[in-house]
Amino acid sequence: MPRNIYFIGTAGSGKSTMVHAFQVWMNTQGFDAITVNLDPGAENLMYNPDVDIQDWITLKEAMEDTDLGPNAAQVYCADMLALNAKEVGETIRKFETNYILIDTPGQMELFTFRESSKIIVDEFGMQDSILAFLIDPILARTPSGLISSIMLSATTQFRFSVPLTTVLSKKDLLSETELERILEWSKSADSLYNSLEEEAETAVFLSSTEFFVALENMGVFRGLIPVSSLELQGFEDVYNEIQIAFEAGEDLMTD
């Protein structure tokens, strides 16, 4: 069975760019992967989607048909995804492929927090799905920014109850020192806690030991996988995480 990889993250975290780059990398490794765009408002994508939700609904058409503004039309489109889920799923299943790279809407709340998205994941095959949560490196430069991203990642996994791997995108924007510090924070609650105490204007509740104990008990400190879509770096580590989740480390090769 093909595996569904959902790329999720805040606006500007690099989802569409990574979908494109990850497909290029997979093809160089001998794997077949198709791309699916689930963003009805996406413009100027770097890749040509094999399946595009805009063949069913677009943000522009939704605004014209309903007289809604951009934000309300985005919510309308997100809910319309559920009505088209079966047909989109049937279209995807016509492809003979190993992996399905799914580009989610730019505003992550339109996918993560709408019930329609659960219908989509179920229709595409929940047991064959994994989430790749992209953390913006600019936000992750500060302890409070990273912990906010980690909480979003944990919330996303809680919402969908499928395996999740956490990716630090666009690592090429970081200095070596910044990258090392962020990776240390992601692995060590103590290190992040100490840095939070030093950060100016940090909310008091974030600095409480009880808060970090709760996060540790949730298992959110798992380490980030740094990647660069520009340089095609880190993708082997992401692929290995996918294989651990699905195949206990065994490659899923083409016939």
Image (cartoon, grey):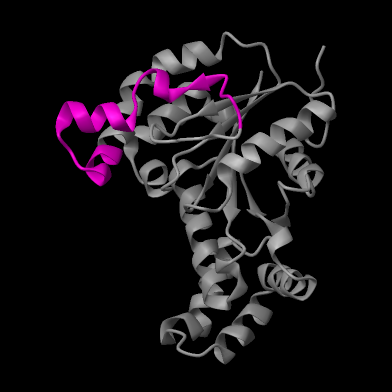
Residue at horizontal 43 percent and vertical 34 percent from the top: 39
Residue closest to the far top: 94
Can residue 223 be seen by looking at this rendering?
no
| Picture quadrant of residue 60 | top left
- Left or right relative to 203: residue 232: right
Q: Where is residue 155 in the image (x, y as percent from the top left)?
A: 46, 55
Residue at horizontal 30 percent and vertical 39 percent from the top: 74
Residue at horizontal 56 percent and vertical 89 percent from the top: 197
Residue at horizontal 79 percent and vertical 71 percent from the top: 176
* Marker count (numbered): 0
Depth order, front residue of 6/42:
42
Q: Where is residue 65 in the image (x, y as percent from the top left)?
A: 18, 26
Q: Position of residue 125 (x, y in %)?
A: 53, 24
Location of residue 91 with respect to 111 vertically, above or below: above
Residue closest to the far left: 67
Which stretch is magenta? 47-75
Asked if the stretch drawn in magenta spans residue 113, the answer is: no
Can residue 187 be seen by looking at this rendering?
yes
* Picture quarter with the N terminus: top right
